[in-house]
Structures are given as structure tokens and as C-alpha cells.
Image (cartoon, helix red, strand yellow):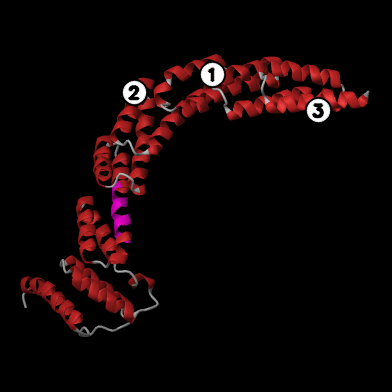
Amino acid sequence: MSPSNARHAIPVLIAVMIATLVAGPALGQEPTDRAGWIKLIDAALESGKDQDALVIAGKAAKALPNDPNFRYAARWFERFGEKRIKEKGYDAGFEVAERALKVLPADEHTSIVVWRNSLYRYWSQELLQKKDFDGSLKVLEKGYALYPTDPHVQGGIAFHTQEALKVAEAKSLDAVIEQYQNLRKQFPKVEDIVQRGQRVAEVAVTKLVDGEKFKEAIDALERYGPLLPRPEQRASVGGMAYEGWALHLADKKEWESALAKYAEGLKAYPGHSRLLGNAGIIANNWARPAVQAEKWDEAIRIYTIAMKYLPDHPVLLQRKAECEARKKEKK
């Protein structure tokens, strides 16, 4: 037989083996020949004979019951799909997923769907590694249009947002805001975009607070406002600025000024739980030496001053009342 005829005979031989196996035992097929079963499954998938591949996989599972790789036919389609992606790209992988969904039993669809939707994320990340942000965005737009709430699709969008905002930050705040707003418009159901916008503002305010630029940190809230579309986000980041300033003053034992700053923050963000709680801690720290020395008049004086800034603070009301009661007991 000539080399040319031999090449043409190979696919025919494989097809005959597949047909024989589907109908009954394969010629020369040893039940425990794991590699042989894999070759037959792969050959059926390569030939587009997906139903035959299912039959072969089922026979292999019976022949090798303790081998987990043969328990689920979906695994072979995923394996074949990954091979196709390496050879022809991600579109070829999606084609394999659609083929699988047509022939697999319903209880194996979930595995294929998860794998298929993960491709949007991996494809996007590969493009991002190449700095192809436009390509990544197109892939994610396609996935989002089909499966807007899928975790893999949303995860891919979250990672794209993170990387896109990094690039924008190197340019300007205006570039960050524009990128953020565009992504919010394109993917309105992806909560992670909102959180990553807030993170940009948090990092900026934290840097200013760490540099003891407290007024600049508070003023920055206006500039970063578009990244904080929800009142609770603005309160969270704004509270960081006021608290940083108050704690700085408390560290210098400028207690009254610290409480005044907490009061200022609570006026800007009424009911802010962190500011309210830590303001009480600062007042207690101020009063602690007097309480420990049982100097009740001094402790009452401190709590009275504190309540000038925080008149309805429940902890301060309680502590002041306790000091007044101890003073009466002492008499």
C-alpha cells in the first residue's frame, strides 16, 4: 500500500472500529485498556460522531468502574473543547459546548454550561494579558448579553474593571471616572464594578489621611463623588477621612478637638455607626484616668464636655449617669 493510500485508510479504520464498538465489543479492544478507550472516544469526537462518543464512554465506564475519568461523559467534551481552543481558538470551544448540550443527558448539562461560560472569563483574561482591552470588552459584552448573572461572566467583568481602572489611574482621575461610568452603563447588573469604583476612592482618601492631609481627604470626596453613586458609599469613604483626623488628634491627647471632629463627621453623615461608636471610645479614653482615680467630678466634667458634641450618645449618657451615681455613693 502506498503512503498516500495508507493515510486515507487510517480514518476509515478508525470509523470501522468505532462502528464495531458501538454495535458490540471492539475488535482487539481489551476491557481494561484505558488508553485504548480514550483514543476511541477522542476519535469519535474528532469525527463529529458525538452520539457514538457517548456510547463508547458508557462502555468504558462499565469496563473501568473505579476510574473517575469515565463517570461523566461531559468531561470528554470539555477535554476535547480545550484541545479545539488550542488549535482553533475560543469560538471552536463554544462550538464543542453546543454540540455537547445536544447529546448529553440533562443531568450533565450543568457541567458543560459552567465550563462554557468560564470560557468568556479565560478568553477575556488572555486578551488582557496582551493589553487588548477592546478585545476583552467585546468578549465580555457577548457573554453578558447571553448570561448577565453568570458568576464566570461577572468575574471576568470584575477583573477587566480592575485592570482597566489601573490603566485609567495612570492617566487622570477624569479617565478613571469615564472608564467607570462606561462600564457601569455596559454592565448594570455587575455589583463588583460599583465596589471597585469605591475602592479607588478609598485608596486615594487613605493615602491623604496617612500623609496627615486631613482637609484634603475630606475635600477629595467631591472629586471622587462620581465613583460613589450611593449615599452609603459616600458615607463609608467620608467617614474614613473624618475618623483619621479625629484619631490623629486623640493620639496627641487633644480630646475635645477629636470629639469635635467626630461631631463634624456625624453632621455630614448622620447615624454613621463607626464614627458614633469610636467617638464614644475616645470620650471613655479621655475620662478613664479620672474614673480609675475615682475623681468623679473630673469624670463628670469630661462626659459633660463630650456630650456637648454628642448630646444623644447613649454610651456617654450611661457613663455620665454612672459617675454621678458613684459620686453620691462616695458622699
**Spot occupied by residue 166 in the image (x, y as percentages of width and height):** 38, 31
297 left or right of 135 in image = right
Camera-side mark, 1 or 2: 1
| Front one among 141 and 68 | 141
Kindly report the secondary structure that dominates the magenta region of the rendered protein. Answer: helix
Quadrant of the snapshot with the N terminus: bottom left
Camera-side mark, 2 or 3: 3
Read off the residue under disc 2. Answer: 175
Q: Is residue 75 visible?
A: no
The image quarter in which residue 188 lies: top left
Amino acid type shown at disc 3: Glu
Picture layout, residue 124 above or below residue 251: below
Q: Which mark is residue 322?
A: 3
**Spot occupied by residue 320 in the image (x, y as percentages of width and height):** 77, 24
Amino acid type shown at disc 1: Ala
Magenta extent = 111-120
The image quarter in which residue 32 lies: bottom left
Q: Earlier in the sequence, mark 1 or mark 3?
A: 1
Determine crowd level at label 3: few under 14, some 14-19, many 20+ residues with C-alpha closer than 10 A: some
Find the distance from the CA under tag 1 to the CA under tag 2. Answer: 28 Å
Residues at marks 1 and 2 touching, judged by CB atoms closer than 8 Å: no
Disc 2 is placed on an element classified as helix
Picture layout, residue 87 above or below residue 24: above
Read off the residue under disc 1. Answer: 268
Determine crowd level at label 1: few under 14, some 14-19, many 20+ residues with C-alpha closer than 10 A: some
Amino acid type shown at disc 2: Ala
Q: Is residue 114 magenta?
A: yes
182 left or right of 200 in image = left
